[in-house]
Image: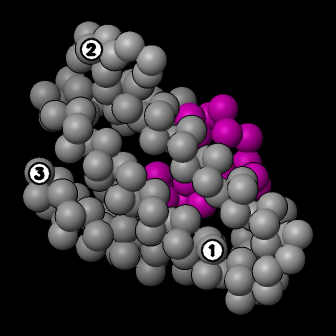
């Protein structure tokens, strides 16, 4: 991925994290307690994965651990998944806006977006799988 995009988003991680927290607080009342300090590292890791700038294995493992912790805490997996997808949408939106600004729709822009959407799905799935596994929930096809 282009270093300009990574730098552009990395320079705005605090702003992106605050937006993730706001969106989750508004859209998922069960997660209205989420604060920026608690999700800052997760946002940074997700941005790195979305950009293809970091090996996703460690990031996916961190999201599985997050999901397992949510399950152990007794949080409803549906609320957790909604919170994850809400945060992911913010990051994808910010990635898309940054890519469009830096690389007006070209092959590079399309590559950035394909990588981001693929990473979003993988990160959310890893977190939800971790929650379901820990909670002992088996879902056919999941």
Residue at horizontal 62 percent and vertical 47 percent from the top: 119
- How many numbered marks are there? 3
Magenta segment = 41-60
Dividing the picture into quadrants, the one containing residue 73 is top left
N-term mark: 1 or 3: 3
Quadrant into which the N terminus falls: bottom right
* Mark 2 residue element: loop
Residue at horizontal 54 percent and vertical 43 percent from the top: 121
Q: Are marks 2 and 3 in contact (CB under 8 Å)?
A: no
Q: Which residue is mark 3?
A: 30
Q: Which residue is mark 2?
A: 137
Q: Which residue is mark 1?
A: 96
* Mark 1 residue element: helix
Measured as percent of width and height from the top left, residue 81 is found at: 31, 42
Measured as percent of width and height from the top left, residue 61 is found at: 54, 30
Measured as percent of width and height from the top left, residue 46 is found at: 55, 53
Is 98 above or below relative to 32?
A: below
Is 68 within the magenta? no
Is 104 above or below relative to 32?
A: below
């Amino acid at each position: 991925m282009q270093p300009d995009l990574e730098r552009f988003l990395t320079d705005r991680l605090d702003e992106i994290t605050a937006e993730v927290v706001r969106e989750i607080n508004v859209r998922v009342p069960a997660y209205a307690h989420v604060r920026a300090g608690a999700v800052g590292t997760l946002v940074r890791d997700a941005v790195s994965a979305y950009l293809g700038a970091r090996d996703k294995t460690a990031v996916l493992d961190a999201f599985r651990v997050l999901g397992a912790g949510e399950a152990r805490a007794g949080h409803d997996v549906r609320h957790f998944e909604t919170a994850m997808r809400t945060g992911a949408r913010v990051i994808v939106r910010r990635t898309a806006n940054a890519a469009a600004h830096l690389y007006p729709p070209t092959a590079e822009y399309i590559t950035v977006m394909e990588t981001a959407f693929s990473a979003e799905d993988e990160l959310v799935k890893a977190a939800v799988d971790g929650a379901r596994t820990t909670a002992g929930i088996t879902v056919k096809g999941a």
